[in-house]
Image (tube, rainbow, N blue to C red):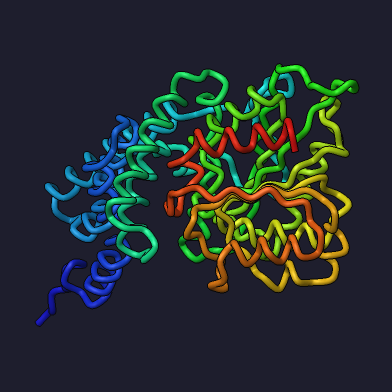
Amino acid sequence: MDTKEPDSETSALGCAFSGSWTLLSLPLWIAAFALLALSTMWTSRLFAIALLCLLPVPLNLLHWRRTSRKIVAVLLLVTGVSALLVCITQTQKAPGTEGDPARLVYYEDSSSLFGVSNVVAEVDQFALRSYLMAALNPDVSWHQASEIRSIMEDLYRDLSRDPHLSSLPSLLGSTHREMLGLNSTSGSLFTYIPGTPSSVESGKKIAIVLLHGGLGNFQGSWSLWKELAESTGAAIVAPTFATGKWSQKGGRAAIAQARNFCIQHPDIDEKRLVLAGISEAGIGLLREAAVAPSEWDKLLLISPLIHQHTMDSKPFIDGWRDRQALIIAGDQTSSASGKSVRTAQASMESFGMRLTTHYLSSSDPFLFLSEWASVKKLIEDWLVNP
């Protein structure tokens, strides 16, 4: 007697595929539902719908012999692909051209400018990240996560009204890849060269080479740095490197690309380059300053994480004695090694560094966002009257 072949959905191979796909796709299901619930932009919601349509397709293929399943699979596939194509079409942006005040400079070894980070609006990406940070990061409370969402909504509302910045693609792709456990990669440079004339006789501008922290080189921050550039006449050159661990392999190369851009730009004074870093970037900034002190004019650290041994090293001491730096920190900001920024301040002053330090009352881990007005004023005063 002939034995009937088992249906694909009940065969051992079918069960294994079904179980594996369910487990592998579970994070995507959760992300899609969360994005659908939390998104403020219609393109982000449409991308969530595309995911929800496409994720069940492989399982429906197991039931391909059934006409009803064929119809469902085709409908899901057509709907999902159509929604995805609309998202991609509506979110396509260009990096700008050489004559634009704001643009992205792409290098061959940089991560791609196009990907999920450009399909899902950054404001919605941060909405999801804020909940993850509150759940996983002991330094971020649920109240602080709520404040981050509120700040980001205001930032991106302002950004949407700026034709120079809102037309640029997102650079958060490399940040997300590192968060998923992949290798750190550099990305494009964000540059803003203001039309504000320089105050020096040469007419060339100071440039702030800005190293981002763990939030990444996100678009919302560009509107803040543009404000600083317009008020001071300084150029902003912001390289991209995953989650801001600039001391890791590839970090110095990304910084070098930013410096080379400044050297080659006709409106920037290569002798007045300020190396700046936010939070985690403080570690990589001080390492770069110790390795190549002659390449930088001044240092700017905002709520920095600091490795004390870098500052105590002979190259750093010899290279930065009698030179200028500005530190802006929350009163309770601590370095990665557990020593306070006040200890780092004492070390710098002990070997004759000309240090300007300001402690704000806030202990917010995202100080430059929550206290931007104060941070901006302090930087302006320091650049004009160091």
Quadrant in the rendering for residue 134: bottom left
Whether residue 77 is visible, yes or no, is no
Q: Which residue shows up at 66% across the image and 59% down it?
A: 246
- Is residue 16 placed above or below 137 in the rendered structure? below
Q: As displayed, is residue 296 above or below residue 345?
A: above
Provide residue 316's location: percent of width, then percent of height: 81, 64
Image quarter in which the C terminus is found: top right
From the viewer's perspective, is residue 42 above or below residue 57?
Answer: above
Q: Nearer the viewer, residue 166 or 374?
A: 374
- The residue that appears at 76% across and 55% down in the rendered structure is 253
Number of numbered markers? 0
Identify the residue shown where x is 49% and y is 50%. Answer: 215
Q: Tell me if 164 is positioned left or right of 41 in this view.
A: right
Q: Is residue 354 visible?
A: yes
Quadrant into which the N terminus falls: bottom left
- Residue 357 picture location, percent across and down: 63, 50
Q: Which of these two is toward me, 122 or 281? A: 281
Residue ID at (77%, 51%)? 354
